[in-house]
Image (cartoon, grey):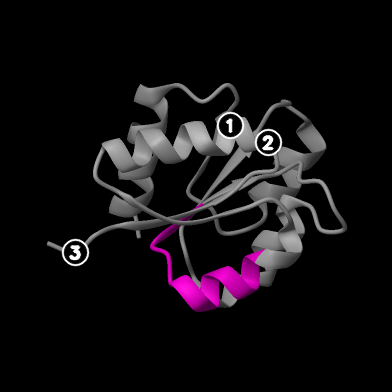
Amino acid sequence: MMMIKILIVEDQIITAMDMRMKLEDAGYEVTDIISFGEDVLQSVKANEPNLVLLDIGLAGKMNGIEAAKSIAEFDLPIIFLTAFNDKSSVGLAGKLNHSGFMAKPILNNKLFAAVEQALGSN
C-alpha cells in the first residue's frame, strides 16, 4: 500500500504540529511543515506530496493564495485552511483549483473527512 504524503503549510506552529500528530497517528506521512509561502514550491518539488494543507493567511511575503498559484502546475489537491471567514480570501481561493476549505480550529473528524474527500476526488 502506498503511503499518502501530506505537506502542511501553516505559520502557527502549534496548529501545524497538532495536525501532523493527528495525520501521522492516522497513518499518513507528513512530508514537511512550512511556515512561509515562499518555501512551498521547493518542498513540493523535493517531497512530492499527494495533498497540501495550506493556510490562506500566511506570514511573510507570499500568502496562501499566492503559494497555491506557485504550485498549480503540479495539479495537487489543496485544502485551504483559514481562521477567518474572509469573503475576499475565500473568493480568491475559489478561483483556484482546490479540494476544499477548513475553518480553524481543525477538528479531527473534519480533518480526516476533508483529506479523504480530497484524495478521492483527485
Q: Position of residue 71 (x, y in %)?
A: 61, 70
Q: Position of residue 40 (x, y in %)?
A: 64, 65
According to the picture, the residue beneath numbered tag 1 turns out to be 15
Q: Report how far apart the C-alphas of labels 2 and 1 lie in the structure.
A: 5 Å
Instruction: Give the structural element (helix, strand or loop) at label 2.
Output: loop
- Which residues, given as a range, are shown in magenta? 40-52
Magenta run includes residue 46: yes
Closer mark to the observer between disc 3 and disc 2: 2
Q: Quadrant of residue 56?
A: top right
**Which quadrant of the figure contains the N terminus?**
bottom left
Instruction: Please give the name of the residue rendered at 49% of the width and 70% of the height, measured from the top-left corner.
Output: 75
Instruction: Please give the name of the residue rendered at 73% of the width and 59% of the height, measured from the top-left corner.
Output: 37
* Circles 3 and 2 in contact, beta carbons < 8 Å: no
Q: Quadrant of residue 38?
A: bottom right
* Circles 2 and 1 in contact, beta carbons < 8 Å: yes
Q: Report how far apart the C-alphas of labels 3 and 1 lie in the structure.
A: 26 Å
**Which quadrant of the figure contains the C terminus?**
bottom left
Looking at the image, residue 14 lies above or below residue 74: above
According to the picture, the residue beneath numbered tag 2 turns out to be 12
According to the picture, the residue beneath numbered tag 3 turns out to be 2
Instruction: Give the structural element (helix, strand or loop) at label 1.
Output: helix
